[in-house]
Image (spheres, helix red, strand yellow):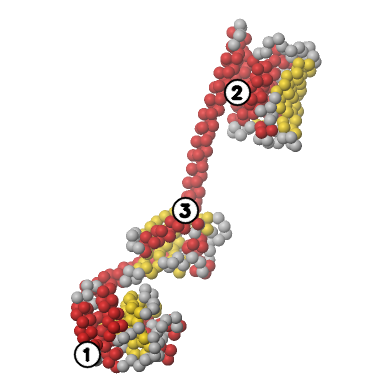
Amino acid sequence: MNDHAAAGLVGVIRQLATAPSLRKTMEIVTEAVRSLLYADGATFVLRDGDLCNYADERAISPLWKGRSFPMSACISGWCMIHGESVPIPDIYEDTRIPHEAYRPTFVRSLAMAPVRRSGQSFAAIGAYWSEIRVIEPHELDLLQTLADASGLAISVAQLTPLAEARLAAETAEARYRAVFDQAAVGVARVSPDGRFLEVNERFCQITGFGGEELLQRTVGDITHVEDLSGGLGQASALIAGKIQTYSTAKRYLRKAGGFVWVNLTASLVRSPLGEPRYFIWIIQDITEQKAAEALEKAQAEHLKLLVNELNHRVKNTLATVQSFAAQTLRGSVDPEDALSRLEGRLLGLSATHNLLTERHWEGATLADVAERSTHPFAMDAPRRVQLSGPQVWVRPEVAVALSLAFHELATNATKYGALSVIKGGVDLGWSWNPEATQLEVVWREYGGPTVAPPVRKGFGSRLLERSLPRELGGPTTLHYQPDGLICRIRMAKTIAQDVKV
């Protein structure tokens, strides 16, 4: 050992004597290997069960820091298993070297020395060169001396965090295995970059994918796009150590189509050095629960709409009744006659409301509206009011407006028109023109007294000629023919387009 190496080694040992942590020890040793052995790279490898964890490195280009390999596949593993330092002048001439792993790197020669404690190797340090070279015995001795100094420097206090971390990792693995074998929940092991590493049978049942299919996919492949960003953020928080675990409800795309809702609990398993190794996912299918919640919400919204609609209809009904009362009593000189007419109009309105209630206020057929409105006026001879027309379904507000019109026409016919005599009758028909999307209703009286235009227009006439057109958007015309009244009611296109045929 030359003076430069000896002086440098003394300085390194002094630094190691005061190194406060395993991490600092690794930094000191890898720097010393490069400096004292003129190496192009140096690494510090920790034994992690059956794995070699490349915990720290200093090199002219990246090697394997943060990665783990089986002990049997690494020269560092061979070194720790046999407890011997080893020089390898040409890595491609040594069968213990995994050549494919080294091809992307600059390494052509290397030397490895075990770090022992109580006679057992728990780590190794390596020196790498970019050219083929003979590693001299004094160089190998210097590397082993650095390894021995590292073993002495790593005190029990420094090893305790590593031992505790290893115990925590082993405990997490044991818990994972225990849950993995349960059939009640879906369990998966997911890499930090989102690849599925392992899934149990229940996880496959919930997502609808086979185990081999999932192992070829990532989390993003089966996560609904709206739910992906939140999960990535929480995964990043786990890796950063900001949270220990997280639980959330997520949607996954099933292979057969549609979604499956799950309760997801995710936790992170770390290596003894604190590096993220994999996530543990536990999922439970809550699709039925979500469907029930959605149904309950929809029912609540529907109930709210019904209450609002009921409130609206009550206000409209009260306004109609108020108008009935005002128009009926206006100018009336006979209170009993006014009361009778008001009761008749209210009964007619009530009959239409009953009809709409039976149809859940979705509407009614025009035939039903006409029949309910005219039935009280033709009870003694039903054939006196003949109904004809196609099957037409009208909205609730249209049904109410038409029923009021039919009631007034029937009342007038009973008092003064065709229904006031035994031989008289009414043809109430309607036609639908699909091309013009127009509905026309015709009330035609026959066989009654001779008809003449009224001297004074009452409530019925004002309802038909003024109020009804505003409701239906089309004109209503009254023709006082000598042989009988004819009333034509037309709906505007915008109203007629809402009619079901």
Residue at 43 percent across and 89 percent down: it is 92
Instruction: Point out the residue furthest to the front here.
Output: 4
Residue where numbered disc 1 is placed: 3
C-alpha distance separating marks 1 and 3: 72 Å
Secondary structure of residue under mark 2? helix
Q: Position of residue 105 (x, y in %)?
A: 42, 81
Labels 1, 3: front one? 1
Between disc 3 and disc 2, whose residue precedes? 3
C-alpha distance separating marks 2 and 1: 115 Å
Callout 3: 10 Å neighbours few (<14), some, many (20+)?
some
State if disc 1 and disc 2 touch (CB < 8 Å): no
Residue type at mark 1 is Asp
Disc marking residue 395: none
Asked whether 195 or 15 is in front, the reply is: 15
Q: Is residue 231 above or below residue 405?
A: below
Within the image, what quadrant is residue 397 found in? top right
Residue type at mark 2 is Ser
Q: Is residue 105 above or below residue 260?
A: below
Residue where numbered disc 3 is placed: 286
Decide if residue 371 is on the left or right side of residue 33. right
Secondary structure of residue under mark 1? helix
Residue where numbered disc 2 is placed: 350
Residue type at mark 3 is Ile
Q: Is residue 101 above or below residue 225?
A: below
Count of marks placed on residues: 3
The answer to whether residue 395 shows anywhere in this view is: yes
The answer to whether residue 47 shows anywhere in this view is: no
